[in-house]
Image (cartoon, rainbow, N blue to C red):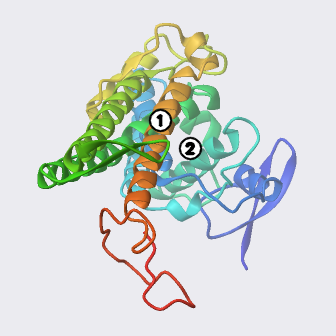
């Protein structure tokens, strides 16, 4: 395998000649061979958007040559279209609060931008990972921003699926509106209920969970981008974060805004905890509904046997005809 030599403050390493990442990514792969899992595509795309916005802002402020910003923007667009995703090789479990992945992104974009300008991988003749791609940034403001953007980019598909589920349950509620069955408490027979009412209650529970998730997700629109290392904005132009977040807002069409207090937004991840709580609450609702359906379909001879769920596969290797819910 052909290699190239790269240097950092710790020394030199031989990196595969064909890859777009560099020495710091190579060290991270060596240091953290933990799970084999990589960060999701939403995180990769979110980070590429941030780097593109940073290049746009720094060029507008006169701190990054337009030629460099153009090449960097082209490299970011390629990543956004799905290129080079095999080059983001850092394990999802890594030290440094995301520094390894930030440098993975910086190195890939720097090498691709240099390539677009006519230089070879690893030469860093024009753009360097830290000096240019990471200009006015720290992992401590870009990684949380990417996490927030990644969640906001991923949530619509979940909310859409929840809406479909809610609609399906509502249709079943109408279908079973006149079916009378036993209500139960503590698994003991209680007063009669209509099966349609039970499915209507399931639909409403999904509706409430969907609205709660959407509500808690709104807090993710407040970004600490521009706070750099500890929320003071050190090494960033005073207008940098306004320009960068403005670009992100235009490109994503999300109501993104700068943090009221950059230090608070850097040190606190309470918005993620609240979103996680709403997702967990929805998971609990799904488990409850699934358990109800499992009980109602139990049998067919010695269980409740009140409903039939569609068979999707045989349920036993020893009992012919057995189907599990």
Q: Image height check: is 87 above or below 245?
A: below
Q: Which mark is residue 281?
A: 1
Q: Is residue 151 above or below residue 83?
A: above
Reading the image, the residue beneath label 2 is 127
Q: Is residue 69 left or right of residue 229?
A: left
The C terminus, quarter of image: bottom left
Query: Marks 1 and 2, Cα distance to the nearest angstrom?
Result: 46 Å
Helix, strand or loop at label 2? It is: loop
- x, y percentage for residue 264? 59, 11
The image shows residue 241, relative to residue 204, as above or below, that is above
Q: Which mark is residue 55?
A: none
The image position of residue 136, as x and y in percent, is 56, 24
Would you place residue 80 above or below residue 269 in this image?
Answer: below
> Quick one: label 1 or label 2, which is nearer the N terminus?
2
Q: Residue at x 61, y 14 (%)?
A: 231
Crowd class of label 2 (few under 14; some 14 to 19; many from 20; radius 10 Å): many
Describe residue 190's horizontal placement relative to residue 6 as left or right: left
Q: Secondary structure at mark 1?
A: helix
Q: Residue at x 39, y 62 (%)?
A: 304
> Viewer-nearest of labels 1 and 2?
1
């Amino acid at each position: 395998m052909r290699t190239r030599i790269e240097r950092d403050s710790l020394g030199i390493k031989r990196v595969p000649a064909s890859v777009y990442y560099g020495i710091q990514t190579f060290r991270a792969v060596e240091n953290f061979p933990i799970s084999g899992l990589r960060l999701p595509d939403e995180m990769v795309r979110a980070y590429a958007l941030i780097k593109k916005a940073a290049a746009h802002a720094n060029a507008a402020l006169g701190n990054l040559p337009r030629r460099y910003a153009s090449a960097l923007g082209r490299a970011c667009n390629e990543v956004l279209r799905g290129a080079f995703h095999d080059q983001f090789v850092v394990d999802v479990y890594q030290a440094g609060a995301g520094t390894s992945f930030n440098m993975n992104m910086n190195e890939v974009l720097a090498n691709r931008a240099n390539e677009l300008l006519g230089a070879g991988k690893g030469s860093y003749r024009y753009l360097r990972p830290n000096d240019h791609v990471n200009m006015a940034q720290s992992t401590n403001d870009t990684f949380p921003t990417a996490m927030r953007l990644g969640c906001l980019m991923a949530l619509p598909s979940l909310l859409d699926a929840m809406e479909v589920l809610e609609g399906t349950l509502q249709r079943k509620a109408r279908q079973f509106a006149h079916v009378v069955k036993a209500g139960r408490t503590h698994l003991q027979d209680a007063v009669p209920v209509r099966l349609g009412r039970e499915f209507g209650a399931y639909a409403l529970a999904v509706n409430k969970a969907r609205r709660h998730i959407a509500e808690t997700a709104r807090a993710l629109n407040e970004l600490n981008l521009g706070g750099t290392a500890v929320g003071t904005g050190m090494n960033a132009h005073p207008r940098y974060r306004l320009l960068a977040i403005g670009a992100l807002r235009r490109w994503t069409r999300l109501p993104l805004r700068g943090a009221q207090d950059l230090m608070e937004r850097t040190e606190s991840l309470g918005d993620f905890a609240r979103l996680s709580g709403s997702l967990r609450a929805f998971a609990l609702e799904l488990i409850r509904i699934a358990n109800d359906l499992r009980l109602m379909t139990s049998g067919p001879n010695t269980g409740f046997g009140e409903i039939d769920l569609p068979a999707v596969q045989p349920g036993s290797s020893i009992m012919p005809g057995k189907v599990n819910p």
